[in-house]
Amino acid sequence: MKIEFTPRASEGVERHIQVSVPPEAVKDAEDKAAKRYASTVRLPGFRPGKAPAIVVRKKFGEAIRQEALESIVREAYEEFVEKESIKVAAQPHVHDLKFEEGKPLTFELHLEVRPTIDLARTNGFRIQRPATTVTEEQLVHQLEQIRDEKATWTPVVEKPQPGDMVNVQIATGAEAGEGKSYPLVLGAGQAIPGIEELVMEAAPGETVERPVKWPDDFPDEAQRGQTKTVRITLNEVKRKSAPALDDALAREVGDFDSLDALKKAVRTDMERHAEHEVEAGVRQQLIDQIIAANAFDVPKSWIQQFVENSAEAYKVPADQREKFAGEFRSMAERQIRRDLVIETIAEKEGLTATEKDLDDRIAEQAEKRGANPGQIYAQLEKTGRLKEMERSITEDKVFKWLLDRNDVSTNA
């Protein structure tokens, strides 16, 4: 098949190719499609595969034409990729397909190629590493969270206040009856302020009613700024009671014989977490500077696929996906660029994780857990996390290589 390819205006990794297929090649593709149909279809009055070609074409003409066109487009795409020796980033798209009997079939092929990443500069960057400190205030806040997790809810017979959990019947406007029952934690943003204020006017068992104005930024635009009569009946009030911060709490939380032992463990854990956050920040600073110094394009199809996969993973509702995509797109592109830089350096410098690296990491985890390395390997394989571990090892090796070649200073 003698197909003509004419490049159109291209930008970055995008390629627009005008394709022209001679009439005889289209006819040949149609004949082949017709033969395939004739050998398989069943028509009344004919044995399977024995129907005349003219009858088959008359009955399945449109389907035969469609199959022939798909075959031509596929063959043209494969021929162009092989001819140009390009690496395609995603499936191509066909635009402006035109075909008239006896004339060439023409269409425009839109595709994206994998970006070429040279990374001419990977050193000479200056990175600031913030000091990792855990303040007494941060420690107290974490201990208060532990107290809060161990808190209990106790019924009270007084008017509720912010932080209390209530069960309340709410009826709005012309709703008949007692309305619907809702559990709410006051002050947690689970109800609009006007309704929360009304709830706090009632004692358990009481019913109160008055007009309430809906906020101007209420999610449902149709209800913004409206004033409705709201009737509430307060069924129950519960107040949170947190245990004392003492040795008894320490023993309840875990294997700690005193409050001091709990504080020490919490501080150590917070310091480890802070160090991890600082290290992640240092790595991101370095990657951002490398990307800024080494321009390359990212296929839009990759960004779109990343956004769609993330929306699925985060279970974003269908009616919110467009908004999510708009907000998440820049983050998706940043992550793809980061991955491409790491992948390129790993390949160029021979830093990709080896089987020995993987075995050593698994053995290290096994020793920490007091488990058998084989069991951990089987567990990782079963859950599909071996690749994730390989990527983590490769990333660690790449950043060690980069940090050895760049200036990292710690803030005082």
Image (tube, rainbow, N blue to C red):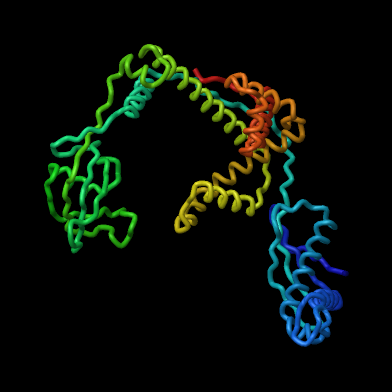
Residue 83, quarter of picture: bottom right
Q: Would you place residue 370 above or below residue 98 in this image?
A: above
Q: Nearer the viewer, residue 397 or 201?
A: 201
Q: Position of residue 212 (x, y in %)?
A: 19, 54
Residue 42, quarter of picture: bottom right
Residue, x 49% and y 24% (percent of image)? 274
Residue 14 visible in the shown view: no
Left or right position of 150 against 287 = left
Q: Would you place residue 225 above or below residue 260 in this image?
A: below
Residue 261 visible in the shown view: yes
Q: Position of residue 273 (x, y in %)?
A: 49, 24
Count of labels in the image: 0
Q: Position of residue 217 (x, y in %)?
A: 31, 53
Q: Position of residue 341 (x, y in %)?
A: 67, 38
Q: Nearer the viewer, residue 368 or 210?
A: 368
Q: Would you place residue 291 above or below residue 393 in this image?
A: below
Left or right position of 152 against 292 = left
Left or right position of 250 against 35 = left
Residue, x 73% and y 74% (percent of image)? 66
Residue, x 78% and y 73% (percent of image)? 68
Residue 218, quarter of picture: bottom left
* The N terminus: image quadrant: bottom right
Q: Would you place residue 218 above or below residue 62 in this image?
A: above
Q: Nearer the viewer, residue 362 or 145?
A: 362
Residue, x 30% and y 46% (percent of image)? 190
